[in-house]
Image: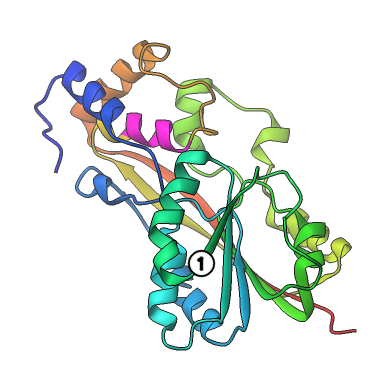
Amino acid sequence: MGDRQASFEELTAEGAAVPTEGWDFSWFEGRATEERPSWRYAESLAGRLARAGAALDVQTGGGEVLDFALGRAAPAAPARVAATEGWPPNAAKATGLLGPRGVTVVAVPEDAPLPFPDAAFDLVSSRHPVRPQWAEIVRVLRPGGTYFAQHVGPNSVFELVEFFLGPQPEAVRGARDPGRERAAAAAAGLEVVELRAERLRVEFHDIAAVVHFLRKVVWMVPGFTVAAYEPRLRALHERIRADGPFVAHSTRHLFDARKSDR
């Protein structure tokens, strides 16, 4: 647990020093909390993997979620599993973690075409893709194949974003809308079998957790550094000291979509 009596300088230095590779959030234990969606994505993914012959995980991060799901799916894991990742430090981490499981990790920019042939997979998954490439997802899925993913929803943790950046325009606030994503998926050729959305409570218990979070989730406050945002960080530090945890809300939605078998 973080030291609530540590100075602003000590806490911001600590948050700035923690490595940001991968999607392991264990450092936040005792310093920040986030409710988890009721559908338990990683465990649900394990069930899908156990029924798949060939699977692709897109934008896998450091591979932690896929590694967990494959472990749960064993010994019925797919015969062929591949993953993509665009950020080189994460790609390297995913290769080290997933390689022993026989997973092929391909370093490819998140907006580039998927480097796989048509109809190569019967399951494509992704946890928190930046922008789903619907046409590419459909292309690499076999007829009757499934896209199963957890997406970040609109206005996620925007209480924190707007504390640093001020009120955001509606075009920014409405990004990642699940209804728009449903329409885009359908236009690309997917039948959305299920789409569930939840709003979840997030608490930041010290300013070190805020610093590490904004360094790790870089699209929240673009160009974030401690030096650039020192006045707002200091104000938030004093607010947390006086009033307790800073409360925000994340949004998540679960996609279960199917490619036509025709």
Residue 115: image quadrant is bottom right
Question: Is 248 situated above or below 16?
Answer: below
Residue 194 appears in the rendering: no
Instruction: Classify mark 1: helix, strand or loop.
Output: loop
Question: Is 163 situated above or below 142?
Answer: above
Q: Identify which residue is drawn at 20% across, 19% down.
A: 8
Residue 65: image quadrant is bottom left
Number of numbered discs: 1
Q: Position of residue 229 (x, y in %)?
A: 41, 15
Compared across the picture, whether 256 is left or right of 249 comes to right
Identify the magenta region.
Answer: 210-217
User: Is residue 216 on the magenta stretch?
Assistant: yes
Q: Position of residue 208 (x, y in %)?
A: 26, 30
Residue 167: image quadrant is top right
Observer-nearest residue: 137 or 10?
137
Q: Position of residue 154 (x, y in %)?
A: 61, 46
Q: Identify which residue is drawn at 62% across, 27% down.
A: 168
Observer-nearest residue: 86 or 45?
86
* Type of secondary structure dominating the magenta stretch: helix
Question: By what rule are the colours in the image chosen?
Answer: rainbow
Q: Position of residue 177 (x, y in %)?
A: 69, 51
Residue 107 appears in the rendering: yes
User: Is residue 4 on the magenta stretch?
Assistant: no
Which amino acid does the dot numbered 1 rest on?
Val
Q: Identify which residue is drawn at 23% across, 32% down.
A: 243
Compared across the picture, whether 65 is left or right of 79 comes to left
Q: Looking at the rendering, in which quadrant would you find the N terminus? A: top left
Compared across the picture, whether 71 is left or right of 199 comes to left
Q: Residue furthest right?
A: 262
Q: Which residue in the structure is indicated by mark 1?
A: 103
